């Protein structure tokens, strides 16, 4: 809670012993895939409808978001209508730029399309320990089993085994996993990397912010962090310490009536 001190722009980190937990659930059924993600400052759910080959409609529920503009970014998924499931991961094919989207719902859409093609439920959990410290430890749990644990310092993975030489910098990371991992493990690595990056939110003092540019300048990384939203959006952050739920706890149900479905014709 705020102590009444003046708000000071800029990200402030306070290393914490509290872990960060991000859970993703992918539930395909005939003609659609339900996907949800929850962590400390986010809770999104989407439903991707398809005809086994092409996306036919998208619903989005931004249940708990950090900024007032996040639902607008999430609604950018309507651009997926008409895109082949096999091409959803090709973001240049449909996304129209990161500054028109919410990256968390884009991630969910990519995972949902893969689940539609693969079939079968899938669940991921990322657990990050030592948040904000010089070295952190991140474990990915896939369908209840530990997939990997990475020790990291900055953007480097310190492991000397299977992941030796891996960096979290986006371009070399993508090149490395494409060369060394199969399709399923590339997806797992993608989920773990995203959890590591976003998991730093667990160590951030959010009370210092009112608008996105209090945290960092516009960088076009999503709709909220592009002009004019970066100067105008208001904080709606309601952090929830999801790690207290414990490993394997399902994501709470969304209030589907709170936010209307994305209109494919919009």
Image: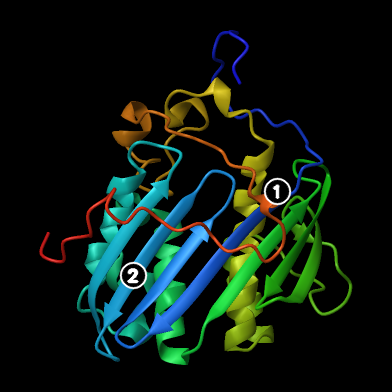
Q: Which quadrant of the structure image shows residue 65?
A: top left
In what element is the residue under mark 1?
helix
In what element is the residue under mark 2?
strand
In what quadrant of the picture does the N terminus appear? top right
201 sits left or right of 150 in the view: left
Query: As displayed, is residue 165 above or below residue 71?
Result: below
Q: Position of residue 98 (x, y in %)?
A: 37, 55
Q: Position of residue 244 (x, y in %)?
A: 70, 48
Which-is-in-front pick, marks 2 and 1? 1
Query: As displayed, is residue 32 above or below residue 234?
Result: below
Q: Which quadrant of the structure image shows residue 151?
A: bottom right
Q: Which quadrant of the structure image shows residue 228?
A: top left
Q: Position of residue 240 (x, y in %)?
A: 58, 42
Label 2, on which residue? 47
The figure's colour scheme reads rainbow
237 sits left or right of 135 in the view: left
Would residue 175 be seen by someone viewing this image from the given angle? no
Mark seen at residue 244: 1
For image coordinates 45% across by 58% down, the residue present is 253
Mark 2, residues whose alpha carbon is within 10 Å: few (<14), some, or many (≥20)?
A: many
Q: Depth check: 229 or 206 in front?
A: 206
221 sits left or right of 9 in the view: left
Q: CA distance from mark 2 to mark 1?
A: 27 Å
For image coordinates 60% across by 85% down, the residue present is 184
């Amino acid at each position: 809670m705020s102590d009444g001190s003046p708000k000071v722009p800029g990200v402030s980190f306070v290393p914490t012993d509290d872990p960060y937990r991000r859970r993703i659930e992918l539930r395909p059924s005939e003609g659609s895939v339900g996907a949800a993600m929850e962590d400390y400052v986010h809770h999104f759910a989407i439903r991707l409808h398809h005809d086994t080959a092409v996306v036919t409609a998208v619903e989005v529920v931004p249940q708990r978001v950090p900024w007032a503009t996040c639902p607008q970014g999430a609604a950018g998924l309507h651009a997926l209508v008409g895109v082949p499931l096999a091409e959803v991961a090709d973001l240049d094919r449909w996304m129209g730029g990161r500054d028109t989207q919410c990256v968390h719902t884009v991630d969910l859409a990519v995972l949902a399309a893969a689940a539609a093609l693969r079939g079968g439920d899938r669940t991921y959990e990322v657990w990050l320990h030592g948040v904000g410290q010089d070295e952190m430890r991140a474990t990915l749990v896939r369908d209840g089993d530990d997939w990997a644990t990475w020790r990291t310092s900055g953007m480097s993975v310190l492991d000397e085994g299977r992941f030796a030489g891996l960096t979290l910098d986006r371009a070399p990371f993508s090149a490395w996993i494409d060369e060394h991992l199969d399709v399923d493990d590339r997806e797992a690595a993608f989920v773990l990397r995203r959890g590591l990056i976003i998991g730093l939110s667990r160590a951030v003092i959010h009370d210092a912010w009112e608008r996105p540019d209090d945290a960092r300048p516009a960088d076009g990384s999503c709709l909220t962090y592009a002009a004019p939203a970066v100067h105008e959006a208001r904080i709606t952050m309601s952090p929830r310490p999801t790690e207290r739920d414990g490993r394997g706890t399902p994501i709470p149900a969304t209030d589907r009536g709170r936010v209307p479905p994305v209109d494919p014709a919009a």
